[in-house]
């Protein structure tokens, strides 16, 4: 009997070891064979790397280099931490973050539990209203609250004066308490969304197991549910704290009348000081970058590992907890929160925009559309809307294009350095608007590429700010497309570009549109980056709003803010419609 | 016959994990080669290497005489003139059946009429006439599988790669489809490289089977050769089932080996050349249906006759499965349906020497 191996095994000679030049030429030919892909990869990665890393380098350089003595030194940091008016902003930011995160927890946890776990009525309505709250930027919410609780003619103050016969209105939104109040009202959804999604995805068996062992509803909630969703709650808290460090618009409009500064407004103040203190601005911006980077790292390394929620799409929906009459209390609380966040400021803004002269009683003679008329006839305002529209549109398109390509490289290839590329796309997250603005101005005012004073710099800034969100979303969208759908196209003879055009992009189109819509909405009313880049003639929507606040043009302010809010809500709803859920709802 | 595909010393690792070790084989034009092995043995990786979606760490891949993959150079998948049927089918959900199948022809820039003619022909080959307007969500698993097949064959590739194409189908459909695939192969005469973990699929479809385990080629040959002369314990037990024994060699005589086992002395007569002449231990296997079982010891006895006791009898309809106790070892035996021996009966087992196949040490 002969060995069956003998006659069939390949007799090909062993390949000779290739020389170095064969290897190099081969690798180059491989890249050249895929030249459309290679070209796109190179252009996108290098452009992004340049516009993110170069300004960041400038920022660090400016803060660490003493331009008088021409040596590297920590002088700027020493000055920052010893001058009370600079360090004060640092402390205020910490205080603000502390208070806001406590209040956010107090608001978000009962609401999340009520919506996800109890028999509270109108649960889906509350969910939708929280989405609307989240879609209201704190900047615009703050303006609504200026109209409501401004110390002189605030709407609520007028009511209090009328009811109690007071001389002076009791509320003053231009205060530290006012900042805490407004921020808490608009950032608690971070905690709400992470907690609700954890509760929704939690295996109901965990609670049932506790119940079958004899624990009551409250005890189960306290000893099982809460610990299981704790990582999600902490994760939401991190986002809240992050927002407190980064936020600019709301703080600027609420704090500047009383000279209350946080880190981000300090950076701006140094920037526009006479003479401008660019190096100190860069120095004050670096702690924001450092703190945000640390928080994000904590969230990724620590919370990422402690995620208990692994079950997805469970077989049975959890049994809602019967809370008796408390269900109405829960609903009442939740409704008050969303009403305070959305309805009150909306109504106030609408009212302010419709009254001829701010402060006059609301009578029919006083109602007019005069502010809207001047809004639409003003050349300046028209230009601001046009600029914002074009910039937001351009930035949304560019950010989606860039992040989709990078997500594809990271998800589908083994290109060397792709992990670095992923980190690059996420880097702007730890680069808040004022810091980015500072960095871009310092990098591109004069020098080899003088872009400061043009709208191009706005476009670059908006695009960079959009990359982390775009990248996260593009990556998860690509993960949902089986790679074999693309491979089958390549196997049938289609090149990379054709495969992208005919297979990948049609399949992720809705998701990309949705993320683009949200990016557009965010950039359309961006304040924190724009304020740093602003130069005469480059008006955008948020710059005008800030001007109106300063000049107390309440009618125009109300009309403009109301319009921007409407644009914003419409876009968020469009995006939610496209994918069934807003992209940020996890 | 010319060589359609040649795999030469291919090694592939992911990080520290080496999934293919120095693998070599050829596929002739028109031949159907089946890569058979348990999941995780590297067979899908090998297919993706051939298609050009992965790059080997060492070795070369040659298609129709042209090198397409090496550790430093890759021809893109779209320039390899192959087709592939994916395990997930990869039917594009945004295109209907016609558009899915027409895709490869559109890339070749054929005329509308020609595309229509060829697509319709391909759809009739896989018996999907009349479903060309449907979308993948409106198709059953078997129909999706046929679309994937039609899409792959319509471009008339020189080489067709199939990655477990039947594994997501239910049992009956799987049997039906594997016959159809065989027919398509015989009719079109294109080379197949077919990956599966199912031995009956391999037997039906393969002109030649390559048995793989842990990234290594274990055995290669015609289905009969693999079944009748497995070279290792893994080969003996992965394809069909086998009783595997080991014993000490006590002597050799004209092509057969004498061994001493725990239940007595035996003569092994099959594939004795895989054992090195100096080996003192030898593993060997006997298929359950090759063992003969007698109620009474035949007069005169013979080689490899042993007394045993039936401990279990399971009726399968087509055959009967017995377990017999032989000196404390359980022996699997399969007999025709009409053998009637009760549990507890004393029997005599015969292991014909030409059915005792010597195995290479693993």
Image (cartoon, helix red, strand yellow):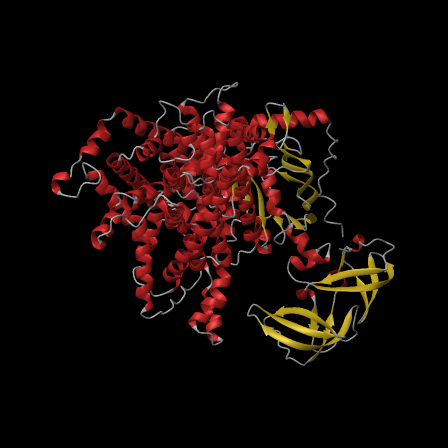
In front of the other: A168 or A302? A168
Out of A338 and B220, give the one closest to the viewer: A338
In the image, farthest residue toward the left: A365
Residue B210 placement, left or right of A212: right
Q: Visible in this render: residue A426?
A: no
Q: In the depicted view, which residue is nearer to us: B164 or A95?
A: A95
Q: Quadrant of residue B23 in the image?
A: top right
At horizontal 48% and vertical 33% (from top left) the residue drawn is A436
Q: In which quadrant is the N terminus of chain B drawn?
A: top right
Q: Is residue A543 left or right of residue B50?
A: left
Task: Tell me residue B312's x, y (percent).
Answer: 64, 76
- Asked if A584 appears above or below B294 in the picture, the reply is above
Classify residue A399 by image quadrant: top left
Left or right: residue A227 versus residue B292 is left
- Residue B162: x percent and y percent? 54, 45
Q: Above or below — where is B77 with respect to A224?
A: above
Q: Is residue A70 above or below residue A185?
A: above
Residue B201 sits above or below residue A243 on the image: below
- Residue A265 in percent (x, y) is at 44, 37
Q: Position of residue B229 (x, y in %)?
A: 71, 55
Number of disc labels: 0
Is residue A563 in sight in this rendering? yes
**Image check: A585 left or right of B53?**
left
Q: Which quarter of the image is occupied by the C terminus of chain B?
A: bottom right
Give the residue at the far bottom of this rendering.
B344
């Amino acid at each position: 009997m002969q060995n069956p191996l003998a006659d069939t095994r390949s007799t090909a000679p062993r390949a000779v070891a290739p020389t170095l030049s064969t290897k190099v030429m081969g690798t180059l030919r491989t890249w050249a064979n895929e030249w459309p892909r290679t070209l796109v990869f190179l252009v996108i990665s290098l452009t992004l790397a340049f516009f993110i890393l170069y300004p960041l380098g400038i920022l660090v350089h400016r803060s660490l280099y003493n331009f008088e003595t021409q040596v590297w030194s920590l002088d700027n940091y020493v000055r920052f931490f010893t001058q009370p008016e600079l360090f004060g902003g640092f402390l205020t930011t910490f205080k603000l973050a502390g208070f806001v995160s406590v209040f956010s927890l107090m608001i978000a946890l009962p609401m999340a539990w009520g919506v996800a776990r109890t028999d509270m009525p109108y649960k889906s309505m509350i969910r939708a209203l929280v989405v609307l709250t989240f879609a209201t930027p704190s900047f615009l919410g703050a303006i609504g609250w200026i109209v409501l609780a401004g110390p002189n003619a605030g709407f609520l103050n007028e009511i209090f004066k009328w009811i109690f016969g007071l001389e002076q209105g009791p509320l003053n939104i231009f205060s530290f308490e006012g900042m805490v109040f407004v921020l808490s009202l608009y950032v608690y959804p971070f905690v709400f969304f992470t907690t609700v999604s954890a509760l929704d995805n939690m295996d109901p068996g965990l609670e049932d197991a506790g119940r079958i062992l004899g624990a009551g509803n409250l005890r189960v909630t306290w000893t099982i549910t809460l610990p299981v969703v704790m990582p999600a709650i902490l994760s939401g808290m991190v986002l809240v704290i992050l927002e407190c460090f980064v936020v600019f618009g709301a703080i600027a409009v609420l704090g500047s009348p009383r000279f209350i500064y946080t880190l981000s407004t300090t950076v701006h103040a140094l920037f526009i000081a006479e003479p401008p203190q660019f190096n100190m601005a860069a120095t004050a911006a670096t702690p924001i970058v450092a703190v945000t980077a640390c928080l994000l790292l904590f969230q990724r390394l620590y919370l990422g590992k402690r995620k208990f929620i692994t079950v997805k799409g469970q077989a049975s929906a959890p049994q809602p907890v019967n809370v008796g009459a408390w269900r109405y209390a829960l609903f009442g609380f939740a409704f008050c929160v969303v009403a305070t966040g959305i309805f009150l400021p909306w109504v106030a803004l609408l009212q302010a925009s419709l009254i001829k002269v701010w402060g006059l009683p609301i009578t029919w003679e006083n109602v007019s559309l005069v502010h809207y008329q001047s809004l639409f006839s003003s050349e300046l305002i028209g230009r601001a809307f046009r600029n914002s529209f074009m910039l937001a549109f351009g930035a949304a398109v560019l950010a989606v294009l860039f992040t989709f390509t990078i997500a594809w490289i990271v998800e589908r290839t083994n290109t060397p350095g792709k992990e670095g590329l992923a980190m690059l796309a996420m880097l702007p997250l730890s680069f808040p608007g004022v810091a980015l603005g500072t960095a871009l101005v310092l990098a591109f005012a004069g020098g080899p590429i003088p872009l400061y004073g043009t709208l191009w710099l706005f476009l670059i800034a908006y695009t960079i700010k959009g990359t982390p969100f775009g990248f996260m979303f593009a990556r998860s969208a690509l993960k949902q497309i089986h790679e074999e759908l693309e491979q089958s196209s390549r196997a049938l003879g289609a090149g990379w570009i054709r495969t992208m055009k005919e297979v990948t992009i049609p399949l992720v189109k809705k998701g990309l549109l949705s993320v683009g819509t949200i990016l557009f909405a965010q950039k359309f009313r961006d304040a924190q980056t724009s304020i740093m880049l602003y130069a005469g003639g480059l008006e955008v929507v948020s710059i005008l709003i800030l001007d109106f606040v300063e000049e107390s043009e309440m009618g125009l302010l109300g009309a403009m803010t109301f319009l921007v809010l409407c644009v914003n809500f419409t876009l968020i709803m469009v995006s939610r419609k496209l994918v069934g859920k807003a992209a940020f709802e996890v | 016959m010319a060589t359609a595909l040649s795999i030469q010393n291919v090694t592939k690792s992911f990080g520290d994990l080496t999934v293919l070790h120095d693998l070599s084989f050829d596929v002739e034009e028109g031949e159907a080669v089946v890569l058979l092995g348990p999941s995780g043995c590297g067979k899908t990786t090998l297919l993706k290497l051939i298609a050009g979606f992965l790059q080997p760490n060492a070795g070369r891949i040659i298609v129709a005489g042209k090198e397409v993959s090496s550790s430093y150079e890759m021809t893109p998948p779209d320039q390899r003139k192959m087709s592939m049927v994916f395990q997930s089918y990869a039917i594009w959900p945004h295109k209907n059946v016609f558009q899915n199948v027409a895709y490869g022809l559109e890339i070749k820039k054929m005329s509308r009429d020609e595309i229509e003619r060829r697509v319709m022909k391909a759809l009739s080959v896989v018996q999907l006439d009349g479903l060309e307007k449907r979308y993948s969500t409106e198709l059953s698993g078997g129909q999706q599988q046929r679309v994937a097949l039609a899409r792959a064959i319509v471009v008339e590739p020189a080489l067709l790669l199939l990655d477990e194409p039947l594994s997501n189908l239910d049992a009956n459909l799987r049997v039906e489809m594997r016959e159809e695939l065989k027919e398509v192969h015989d009719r079109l005469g294109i080379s197949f490289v077919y990956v599966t973990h199912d031995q009956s699929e391999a037997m039906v479809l393969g002109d030649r089977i390559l048995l793989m385990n842990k990234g290594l080629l274990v055995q290669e040959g015609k289905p009969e050769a693999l079944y009748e002369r497995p070279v290792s314990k893994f080969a003996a037990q992965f394809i069909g089932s086998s009783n595997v024994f080991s014993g000490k060699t006590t002597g050799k005589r004209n092509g057969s080996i004498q061994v001493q086992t725990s239940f007595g002395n035996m003569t092994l007569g099959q594939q004795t050349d895989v054992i090195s002449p100096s080996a003192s231990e030898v593993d060997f296997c006997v298929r359950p249906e090759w063992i003969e079982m007698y109620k009474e010891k035949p007069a005169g006895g013979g080689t490899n006759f042993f007394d045993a006791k039936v401990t279990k009898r399971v009726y399968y309809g087509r055959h009967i499965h017995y377990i017999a106790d032989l000196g404390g070892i359980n022996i699997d035996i399969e007999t025709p349906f009409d053998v009637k021996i009760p549990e507890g009966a004393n029997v005599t087992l015969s292991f014909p020497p030409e059915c005792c196949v010597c195995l290479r040490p693993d």
